[in-house]
Amino acid sequence: MTLPTAGHNYKMERMGISAVAEAIAHAGLIWRETPTGDVGIDGQIEYVDGQGRATGRIVGVQVKCGVSYFEDAGSSWRFKPQEKHRFYWERYPVPVLLMLHHPENTQTYWVDVRQVLRSPVVDPQYVFVSKKQILQTTSPEALFAGFGVTGAEFLDIPQVLQSLILTECRNKSFPISYFDLFANGLTNICRSLYFGMDLADTIAEAALAAYEAPTGLGMGPEEHEFLFGYTHFVTEQQIADINFADCLIDWYDRELQPSFLAPLTSRGHDLVREIGHWQDKLERDGEIEVRAGVRVAQEGLVHMILAPSHIERIPIIWRFQNALRSKL
């Protein structure tokens, strides 16, 4: 008699999926398995905050189960993805966690594979999964690092404004607050937020000049941590739709401050209105005097400043495209 069979591959697949689902349930997160059309994503995890609220922050998950996936590379497991999956995961709209489940020790190892594939220092063939990153002992915040999630309290807009104003750099040679960065970074008719080292330096230099500070501009590790903390805060509080995963590449892989031009969220627009309400009140009460038409939350213009070396490239770019045009 001939009957359908559920072979080894099916067994491995279900063991891996079940292990992930169980670990995610224990972490208090939401697991949604892909019911049909799995072409590289087995399911999704949604982040649930400390108050049990679903946040809409979602990561994709690809699970691989079987001893054959565990190629020892010292402190990591070396995994070779198929080319089609490399491109698919890299272009996925949310972070993708690759999870390798070991059927013998029942542990699941994971890595943000989209983050790895987008890094400029990525290995051309392999993805390395740290042996220390075990799903069963990982915090929910670590899984959602690509969203800047730390588990910090989600603040009301008045509290966000308070935090922006009260969070200041302690270095007197870098007198700047989170509010300075936000208010001066508004652009695109206050629909977007810009950040870059040029903005931070300009604000700090203006403050030093206004206060007639005896010291010049000073930048060190503490100041860089302060600036990256601003990006983290604005992302976590969902004030602007920042690609934080890309910021992490600049911060960790390139050891640079990230720069971004990101649209404000509805909360960001609420924050702009909150600032406007306070400005109106302070003006009415005579506590501040502002020239007509000037707003605290008002757009600035963002433009690229071409260095002499860049201007020199303009005719080179012309010659390049003209020479190549005849060959295309």
Image: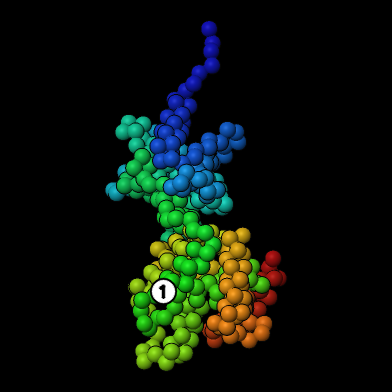
Looking at the figure, which quarter contains the C terminus? bottom right
Residue 201, given in percent of the width and then of the height, sits at 46, 81
Residue lying farthest front?
285
Left or right of 102, for residue 165: right
Locate residue 116: give its quadrant: bottom left
Seen from the viewer's position, the closer of residues 145 and 324 is: 145
Residue drawn at 68 percent across, 75 percent down: 322
Seen from the viewer's position, the closer of residues 101 and 84 is: 101
Left or right of 145, for residue 130: left
Examine the rendering and report whether any part of residue 256 can be seen.
no
Please determine whether, in this image, residue 34 is positioned above or below residue 285. Answer: above
Count of all numbered marks drawn on residues in the image: 1
Residue drawn at 50 percent across, 45 percent down: 53
Seen from the viewer's position, the closer of residues 188 and 280 is: 280
Regarding mark 1 in the picture, which secondary structure is present there?
loop
Locate residue 270: give its quadrant: bottom right
Residue 238, given in percent of the width and then of the height, sits at 53, 59
Q: How is the image coloured?
A: rainbow
Question: Which residue is disc 1 drawn over?
Answer: 168
Locate residue 40: give its quadrant: top right
Residue 16, given in percent of the width and then of the height, sits at 43, 33
Residue drawn at 61 percent across, 60 percent down: 266
Please determine whether, in this image, residue 31 is positioned above or below residue 163. Answer: above
Residue 265, given in percent of the width and then of the height, sits at 60, 60
Please determine whether, in this image, residue 234 is positioned above or below residue 211. Answer: above
Residue drawn at 46 percent across, 41 percent down: 29
Disc 1: CA contacts within 10 A as few (<14), some (14-19) or many (>=20): some
Please determine whether, in this image, residue 289 is positioned above or below residue 228. Answer: below
At label 1, the amino acid type is Glu
Seen from the viewer's position, the closer of residues 163 and 70 is: 163
